[in-house]
Amino acid sequence: MKVNDEAASVGRDERRLLAVLALLKGEAVNHVCRQYNISRSDLYKYKRRAIAAMRVAMRDHRRGPKHPPRRLAEDKERRIRTICEREPTLSSYQIYRSLETGAPCCPRTIQRVRKRFSLPRLMKRATPKFKAHRFTEAEKNLIHQQVKAKLFLGCYRLAWDLQNEYGMRISPSTAKRVKRAILAEMNPRPAPMVWRFYERHHPHRLWHGDFLEKVTLTYEDRTAYQLTLMDDYSRAYVFCDLYREPNLNTTIRALIAAMRKYRTIPQALLFDNGSTFKGKLLSTFCEHLGIRLIHSSPYHPQTNGKLERAFRDDMNEFYHRRKKWIFNELRRELPAYVHYRNHVRGHLALGGKPSNIRLQEQDFFALPEVLERLEKYAWRAIGSRKVGAHGFLRLRKRNVFLHPQLQGREVNLYETAEGLQAESGDGRMFRLPKYRAQLRRAFHRVRDADNQRLSLTQIYQSRSDEDSTEMLNRNTSESITEKCVPINENRPRITVAL
């Protein structure tokens, strides 16, 4: 049989498809068999296959994958189902935590397993059998009136009186809540204190001072203290040093060093309530110079928050960069860090500029003669004492040797930055440095302290000098103000920043 050119050009499968389509169009069977060279039986066989395939193709199929990925294994699903049946009160998160570590499931999978097998989630508490008791408005008013009339009674007495007199079911806790509400209404709480941000408008108007107490020395097993004085307007460190055992005199010496360095006297000082910042000597020193001494509110470090925030930067940028905290090394490298912080490091409050930019706006300076005599303003009169036998003086239950020639005479005692000073009537001066530490009597060392002899050494300087007498008898703030004279309107005035 001769094959058509078109039928010969296509493949076998394509030829079968065309033959079935021609047969379905209604062409004669003999004509289709001769055209595509297919027998009658094969043609009907291909027709049946095509109709069956078309029926399968016309069916609706479910969208998505036939086998979802990451399907839970049967053994794991059985284990989760067993736990859910044994502990129906546990949540999916509790069941997940009870499984071994690294289990390939999540609480959401446990919820799906419960839903798939219709496993209930029971509550731990039983269903209440009766409705909770609720007071009516009339009962509430009655309870409020009775409790308000008997505020002097306790919660149990109030509950018992209401139960016995009016037959009301009321618990002591309910009576207590009503009593608290009445007391709060009668005595309302004061409004919370509102704290606000502050900033001085000129340099050296306010100095913040505090100790950084987080520097634990490596080989000494003790803490070093970083005393810092910061200017409020410029955020600059006007003083920064490290100490082992700071005291009140340390603070005064630091203030004197900062005043001489920047040739000024601050208007106010802000400290916390530590013992190194609260003392009569420091208060008198600030009073003599006309400085306002401010202490922050107890348990509110935000008052001195600028310096507290600066301490956090010091820990991150200076101390944590060193593996070992050696006292001498830290003290030697600290000035370089302070120079970087004042001249290079930018501050967000200053728009990224260093602190030195604002420090240059200083236009008031103290007189040199005032700066030279700053130590003389750090004094406080304690009182007069009478010298006992053999020249001994009784101080804080201790015998301190003064001089045998002063037996029976009165001496004036003064507390200064250098220590305790005693002045006789003829102008002789005696000094005991670090007298607080030396006169401190430890309870378990009383006998050793009594055996230790303390003596005041004579110094060749008297408080009866002309300068000292002028400072004692004249109001210091007025004398400083009198010496503040303007020089030229175009130049900064040589005066004290008050």
Image (tube, helix red, strand yellow):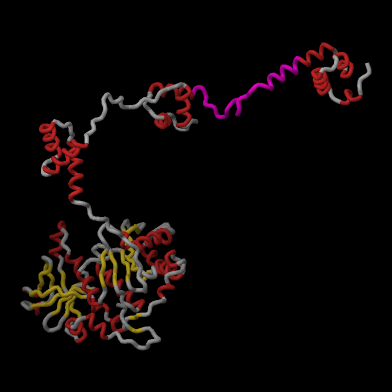
**Depth check: 436 or 43 in front?**
43
Q: Is residue 394 left or right of residue 108?
A: left
Q: Position of residue 21 (x, y in %)?
A: 80, 21
Residue 299 in the image: above or below residue 369: above
In reply to whether residue 177 is colored magenta, the answer given is no
Q: Is residue 74 magenta?
A: yes
- Residue 305 is left or right of residue 465, and the answer is right
Q: Quadrant of the N terminus?
A: top right
Q: In the rendered image, which quarter is residue 51 located in?
A: top right
The residue located at (16%, 84%) in the rendering is 464
* Front residue of this view, candidates 172 and 318: 172
Q: Is residue 173 above or below residue 236?
A: above
Using the rendered view, name the quadrant where residue 453 is placed: bottom left
Could you tell me if residue 265 is visible in this image?
A: yes
Q: Quadrant where the C terminus lies?
A: bottom left
In percent of width and height, residue 358 lies at: 41, 73
Image location (x, y in percent) of residue 267: 30, 74
The residue stretch that appears in magenta? 48-75
What residue appears at the point 38 percent right and 24 percent down from the top-left corner?
88
Indicate the position of residue 354 as horizontal and vertical percent values: 45, 69
Vertically, is 441 above or below 162? below
- Residue 307 seen from this side: no
Which residue sits at x=45%, y=25%? 114
Q: Nearer the viewer, residue 115 or 363?
A: 115
Residue ranking furthest to the right: 2
Tell me the quarter of the picture where residue 54 sits. top right
Task: In the rendered view, tell whether residue 483 sits above or below residue 191.
Answer: below
For the image, the number of numbered tags is: 0
Q: Is residue 359 left or right of residue 147?
A: right
The extreme bottom residue here reads 488
Q: Residue at x 25, y 62 (%)?
A: 274
Between residues 241 and 483, which one lies in front from this camera angle? 483
